[in-house]
Structures are given as structure tokens and as C-alpha cells.
Image (cartoon, grey):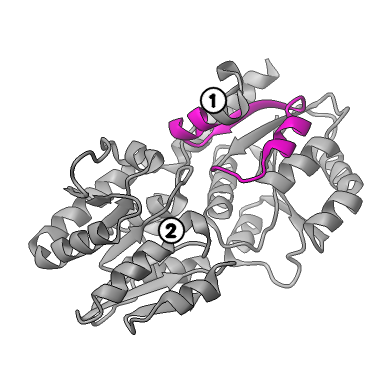
């Protein structure tokens, strides 16, 4: 059996890319013949993760489409040719990641009897109905990355339960644990992610606008369509927009931060959350289903935040709740070491090798 992972771009420094890179390496270590195809142009420079894949024997192909429209109108034959060459008449699974890959991968594999398509459902996508309805006959199995993602697929798209197999995302904990932290002089709170509605940065900016007098720094790593609006909102000098960074630099900043804050409105199963836990960072997570599922906490009811062994669970859209939790964190430095130990322990259940084994089992079941 051969496995081909297909994703939109090899240059994006997001959680999905990090997961797919780690999954490819983990499968290679388990003696799977695995390849990776990126659709959009990333020919300027291989990032460190792509270089690592190639060094470890993973075949990586970049199709080079200049845009999503360009990909859909011109690159389907090229993708089909690459898949046929890799598959070479053997039983093959194409694992599709994100919307463009679902559309193009589904079209490119039509009529290939030796190729099965699997889709990993990473998160709540906007405007996904078209992709789902067009390609549901081509996708043999959906892999939601969490129980909450499975529930969402059932409620939004009425996907039959028997056509889904939940497999939690994973990370290369051993590799991440070697990251050297970037130290800071002041108390540093860090958020990482695209500057979009999903990540809910306005609630944090409003929070830090109100606590500017404290010796604290709030760093935001990422870029996105809401960047200018968020910068205009930020009136406190303690709020720093650091732009995008290579993954290793992000992990170094994470390892050196005192608290990682993720105020998201929704997530699938966040890779960055796992990475932060693997680095032993105290966490501040919004009270949403996927985060609660990951850390095994029940929902907040009367309380606006809850101090947990690993950090804080905070009411989703309440700046006063985040402010209170941050003050609690600052005032209880004696709890920090315990939170760090608990975070390390939390990371143990997100091992990428376990995730890879589950993926391989699912692939094999499709070949029976």
C-alpha cells in the first residue's frame, strides 16, 4: 500500500501543515511508502520541515499553481499524472487536507480504481458545502480530528457515522522537547495563529488595553485579513505584533513565554496547543468543545474562568474573565511549576507515532 498526502501549500506555517509533515515522517518511520504533494507554488525556497521530509526519504512534489483559481482550471491533469506515477498500479490512499485539496484531489483521482480518497477534517470550514457535496462520492472515509469535529460533520453535512473514523491529531513530542527557549525579561503572554475572526484576538486586545500598567508583554505571532483592524484596536504599548515566523522560531518563542493564550471561537484539534503543552507551557484556553475535549474539562457554568492543573479555562468572549484569569496567574507564581509539569504530562497523549498507527490501520481497512 502506498500513501499520498495532498495539501494546498507547502509554504504555509500553520498547524495543519505541521501536522501533515509530522504524520508523513511518522509513517515513514513505520515503513510506509509515503509521498506529499503541495498544489500551490512554493518553489522559492523549501522550508526546514520540507527539507527534513526529503532528507528522510519522503517524496515531496510541488505542482506550482499560482493561485487556487489557477489550480482548479489548469492543474488537475498534472495532479492526476503525479498520482498515477506514484501509485504505479499499486493500492494507494490519497489523504486530502483542506478545501482546495479535496476538490482537486477528488477530481484528479476519478476513475482510478486502485486509488481510494480519505479526507482529514481539520476544523470548521466556512463555505465548505460545495466541496463536500461535489466530492462525497469520491471520499471513502472522513477522519475528523476530534469528537467535536465528528459531531460538527454530522450536524452540518449529515455525514453517516459509519463513514467517519475519529483520529486525534498528534505531534512529534521528542523533537519539540529539544527546542531552545527564547528568554524574556518581563512576564510574557503569547498567542499564535492567523489574524482572523476564528482566533478571537479582539477579546485579548481589549483585555490588555485595560492592564497596560503591569510589567507584562503580550506578543501575537501571525498575519491575516484582520491585521490592520487589530493593530488599530491595540492602544497599549504592551501589545506586540510580531508577524509570521518559521516554525522553529515560533516554538522557541513559545518555550520562552510564561503563558500561552488561545482565545479561539472554534478549533478542530489545535496542533499549536499540543506543541505548547509539549513545551511545558501553562495554557489559557477558551471554553470551547474541542479544547475541553483535549484537556478533559467540563464546561464553565457559573464561573467566568477556572484554574486547572495545566492553566486556565476561560469564558469565550469575556475580556473581564481573561483579565481576572491573568491577574490570578500573575499573583500565584508558586503554581507555575506545577502547571508546567501538568502540561508536559498532558502532551503525552498527543504522540504522533500513535496517530500514524491509527491512520495506517484505517487505510488498511479500506483495502480489504
Give the side of residue 300 with respect to residue 290, left or right.
left
Residue nearest the observer in this picture, 191 or 10: 191
Q: Which mark is residue 165?
A: 1
Provide the secondary structure element on which disc 1 rests.
loop
Quadrant housing residue 89: top right
In the image, residue 151 above or below residue 266: above
- Where is residue 260 shown, x and y percent of the image? 32, 61
Instruction: Indicate yes or no whether the magenta region holds residue 251.
Output: no
Residue 150 lies in the magenta stretch: yes
Residues rendered magenta in the picture: 123-152
In the displayed structure image, the side of residue 9 where residue 165 appears, left or right? left
The answer to whether 323 appears left or right of 328 in the picture is right
Question: Is residue 155 among what the camera can see?
Answer: yes
Q: Residue at x 73, y 65 (%)?
A: 42
Q: Position of residue 138 (x, y in %)?
A: 77, 28
Q: Nearer the viewer, residue 126 or 194?
A: 126
Query: Residue at (67%, 41%) from the top-left corner?
Result: 128
- In the rendered image, the quadrant that contains the N terminus is top right
Secondary structure beneath label 2 = loop
**Residue under the image location 46 percent in, 46 percent down:** 267
> Which label number is shown at residue 157?
none
In the rendered image, which quarter contains the C terminus?
top right
Does the image show residue 190? no
Q: Earlier in the sequence, mark 1 or mark 2?
A: 1
Q: Are marks 1 and 2 in contact (CB under 8 Å)?
A: no
- Disc 1: CA contacts within 10 A as few (<14), some (14-19) or many (>=20): some
Mark 1 and mark 2: Cα distance apart in space: 29 Å
Disc 2 designates what residue? 200
Depicted 209 relative to depicted 352: above or below: below
| For residue 348, above or below residue 335 | above
**Depth check: 173 or 137 in front?**
137
Amino acid at each position: 500500500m502506498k500513501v499520498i498526502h495532498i495539501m494546498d501549500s507547502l509554504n504555509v506555517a500553520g498547524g495543519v501543515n505541521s501536522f501533515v509533515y509530522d504524520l508523513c515522517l511518522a509513517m515513514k518511520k513505520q515503513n510506509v511508502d509515503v509521498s506529499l504533494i503541495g498544489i500551490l507554488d512554493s518553489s522559492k525556497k523549501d522550508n526546514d520541515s520540507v527539507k527534513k521530509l526529503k532528507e528522510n526519504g519522503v517524496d515531496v512534489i510541488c505542482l506550482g499553481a499560482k493561485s487556487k483559481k489557477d489550480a482548479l482550471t489548469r492543474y488537475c491533469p498534472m495532479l492526476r499524472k503525479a498520482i498515477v506515477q506514484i501509485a504505479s498500479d499499486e493500492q494507494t490512499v490519497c489523504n486530502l487536507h483542506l478545501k482546495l485539496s479535496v476538490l482537486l484531489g477528488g477530481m484528479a483521482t476519478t476513475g482510478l480504481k486502485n486509488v481510494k480518497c480519505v479526507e482529514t477534517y481539520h476544523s470548521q470550514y466556512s463555505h465548505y458545502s460545495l466541496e463536500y457535496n461535489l466530492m462525497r462520492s469520491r471520499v471513502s472515509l472522513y477522519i475528523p480530528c476530534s469528537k467535536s469535529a465528528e459531531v460538527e460533520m454530522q450536524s452540518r453535512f449529515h455525514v453517516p457515522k459509519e463513514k467517519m473514523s475519529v483520529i486525534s491529531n498528534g505531534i512529534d513530542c521528542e523533537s519539540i522537547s529539544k527546542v531552545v527557549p527564547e528568554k524574556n525579561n518581563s512576564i510574557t503572554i503569547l498567542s499564535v495563529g492567523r489574524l482572523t475572526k476564528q482566533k478571537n484576538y479582539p477579546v485579548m486586545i481589549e483585555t490588555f488595553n485595560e492592564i497596560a500598567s503591569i510589567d507584562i508583554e503580550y506578543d501575537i505571532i501571525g498575519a491575516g485579513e484582520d491585521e490592520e483592524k487589530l493593530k488599530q484596536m491595540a492602544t497599549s504599548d504592551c501589545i506586540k505584533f510580531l508577524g509570521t515566523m518559521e516554525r522553529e522560531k515560533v516554538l522557541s518563542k513559545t518555550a520562552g513565554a510564561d503563558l500561552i493564550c488561545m482565545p479561539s471561537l472554534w478549533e478542530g484539534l489545535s496542533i499549536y496547543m499540543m506543541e505548547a503543552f509539549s513545551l511545558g507551557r501553562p495554557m489559557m484556553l477558551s471554553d470551547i468543545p474541542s479544547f475541553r475535549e483535549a484537556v478533559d474539562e467540563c464546561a464553565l457554568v457559573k464561573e467566568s474562568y477556572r484554574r486547572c492543573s495545566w492553566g486556565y479555562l476561560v469564558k469565550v468572549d469575556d475580556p473581564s474573565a481573561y483579565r481576572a484569569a491573568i491577574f490570578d496567574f500573575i499573583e500565584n507564581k508558586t503554581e507555575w511549576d506545577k502547571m508546567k509539569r501538568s502540561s508536559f504530562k498532558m502532551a503525552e497523549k498527543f504522540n504522533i507515532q500513535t496517530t500514524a498507527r491509527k491512520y495506517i490501520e484505517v487505510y488498511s481497512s479500506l483495502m480489504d
